[in-house]
Image (cartoon, helix red, strand yellow):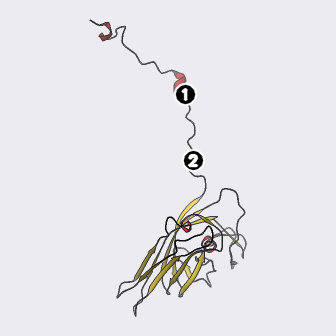
Amino acid sequence: MDPRRVRGGVGKRRKPRKGVQDSLVIPRPMQLPNVGMVHNHVMRYVTTGTVALALTFKSLLDSILACATTTTGFQVFDLVKIVKIEMWAYNPSGVTSLTIEYVGRSVGHVGDDNAHTATSMGIEPAYLCARPSRKALVSEFQADSTDTAFNIYCPIATVVDVHLVFKSAMEGAAPIAVANALVAGQPGMIYYRGIDGAAIASSKFTPQGTQQYI
């Protein structure tokens, strides 16, 4: 009989015993996929009048601000990306239309040059869901600028949901002041504004879901 087939025979291979040194190996730290602050947010508004505006990346970034003094505020985030915009509107006495245009043609902010529109019919409200093309730079992270992010046209009392992704810069950039002064702000507070960046008294967009607007 082959001695290698005998249990405990001289030909049987044995697994090397795991030493104490092997069990003390410390795995290296895993990589961190993202150390920046990223905030996915749906900004909901109700319009206080008829809207026909060209909104900028600055006004989008001004919509979330940190109060420094009673009259000054700074953008909380440095970059913003548009995911989609949804709108609902109803006119009981006739038809109503909604339109979003991603027409930013400035270098670095190129839109898809397309208009998205919807119209109400009968008792059905108008509903619009407009996404920028994935190939358009307007759908990528953009910094503070006065270049047009999109044009918006809608009637009074339109519900507007703006799906945005905010991100903080990694190079330690200086904070950027919001375009319009605050009124009786409380230093240290985080406030919300309309996507037009205007103070609540003159904005055509009233933030919903929060009382911390100014």
In the image, residue 132 sits, relative to residue 92, either above or below, namely above
Find disc 1 in the rendering and name its residue.
24
Classify residue 106 by image quadrant.
bottom right
Q: Residue at x 72, y 63 (%)?
A: 174
Q: Which residue is mark 2?
A: 32
Question: Residue at horizontal 56%, vertical 32%?
Answer: 26
Looking at the image, which residue is at 60% across and 52% down? 35
- Out of 144 and 182, give the one closest to the viewer: 144
- Sequence order check: which comes first, mark 2 or mark 1? 1
When asked about the image quadrant of residue 118, the answer is bottom left
How crowded is the residue under tag 1: few (<14 C-alpha within 10 Å), some, or many (20+)? Answer: few
Q: Residues within 10 Å of mark 2 (few under 14, many from 20)?
A: few
Q: Nearer the viewer, residue 45 or 79?
A: 79
Residue 192 percent across, percent down from the top left: 60, 73
Mark 2–mark 1 distance (CA, rounded to whole Å):
24 Å
**Discs 2/1, front:** 2
Q: Amino acid at mark 2?
A: Leu
Q: Secondary structure at mark 2?
A: loop
**Looking at the image, do the residues carrying marks 2 and 1 touch, with CB atoms under 8 Å apart?**
no
Q: Residue at image x 48%, y 21%?
A: 18
